Amino acid sequence: MLSLQHDILRTDISGMPLEWISYQGAVRLYYLEQVAYSCGHLLYRIHGGYNAATGRRSVIDVNSIIATDGSVQASLKGRPGYTPPLNNATLFRRDGFLCMYCGGHQRQSNLSRDHVRPMSRGGDDAWNNVVTACKHCNSHKGNRAPEQAGMQLLAVPFTPTHAEYVYLQGRRILADQMEFLRAHFPRRSPLRERLKSSSYASAARFLS
């Protein structure tokens, strides 16, 4: 068993990844008998109080992945048309903390969100139109399209599925959790190939 810093991956009853929860949140779900089943390895063994009648102490075993009866709203996240909310933290991780113009690794504080087609020219603030850019490249590109600025994109921006988005939100992801999440990635997911790259896998050290 590990320290209490690791989160638990919560899924719906069909096994669709939904979110990360703390061990306290998982214990609450176990206590309320809302955990349909669990998989992965035993992560925590939480000891509670003693039963006055029997003298026995309650124990709750928390696995790294638990399935619960999700709400209708939660189940909608697994549908093909669902678009995860866009924010810089997950955008930077989608792109591996790489500037999509110069290819340099950067710390999060040195990165920015660039609109490939500037919003002033009709571009959307959406996953398919934004990439990670270092502040220098973003400033150089300015209010221009990449080709107008003499710059070339290193990768095509894409909208992550909800399973990919859950991965991008994760911290200290365990091997069994990662294997479970990757099984839900689309077959041609760009993240599949990037995760095989040692440079991409090591990019987590740039988190600040």
Image (tube, rainbow, N blue to C red):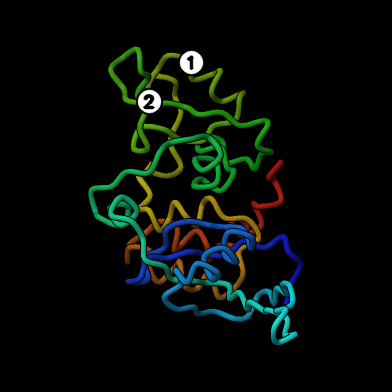
Q: Amino acid at mark 1?
A: Gly
Q: Residues within 10 Å of mark 2 (few under 14, many from 20)?
A: few
Horizontal side of 189 relative to 109 (left or right) equals left
Measured as percent of width and height from the top left, residue 199 is found at 62, 56
Residues at circles 2 and 1 in contact by the CB criterion of under 8 Å: no
**Badge nearest the viewer, 2 or 1:** 1
Q: Between residue 57 and residue 60, name the one nearer to us.
A: 57
Q: Between residue 77 and residue 207, name the one nearer to us.
A: 77
Measured as percent of width and height from the top left, residue 15 is found at 37, 71
The image quadrant of residue 16 is bottom left
The image quadrant of residue 72 is bottom left
Looking at the picture, does residue 28 appear above or below residue 144? below
Determine the residue located farthest toward the front in the rendered image: 53
Residue at image point 37% right, 44% down: 84
Pointer 2 or 1: first along the chain: 1
Residue at image point 34% right, 37% down: 128
Element assignment for label 1: loop
Q: Between residue 199 and residue 96, name the one nearer to us.
A: 96
Residue at image point 35% right, 32% down: 126
- Residue that badge 2 annotates: 147
Looking at the picture, does residue 138 appear above or below residue 188? above
- Residue that badge 1 annotates: 142
Q: Amino acid at mark 2?
A: Glu
Measured as percent of width and height from the top left, residue 94 is found at 49, 47
Looking at the picture, does residue 195 appear above or below residue 63? above
Q: Residues within 10 Å of mark 1 (few under 14, many from 20)?
A: some
Q: Quadrant of the C terminus?
A: top right
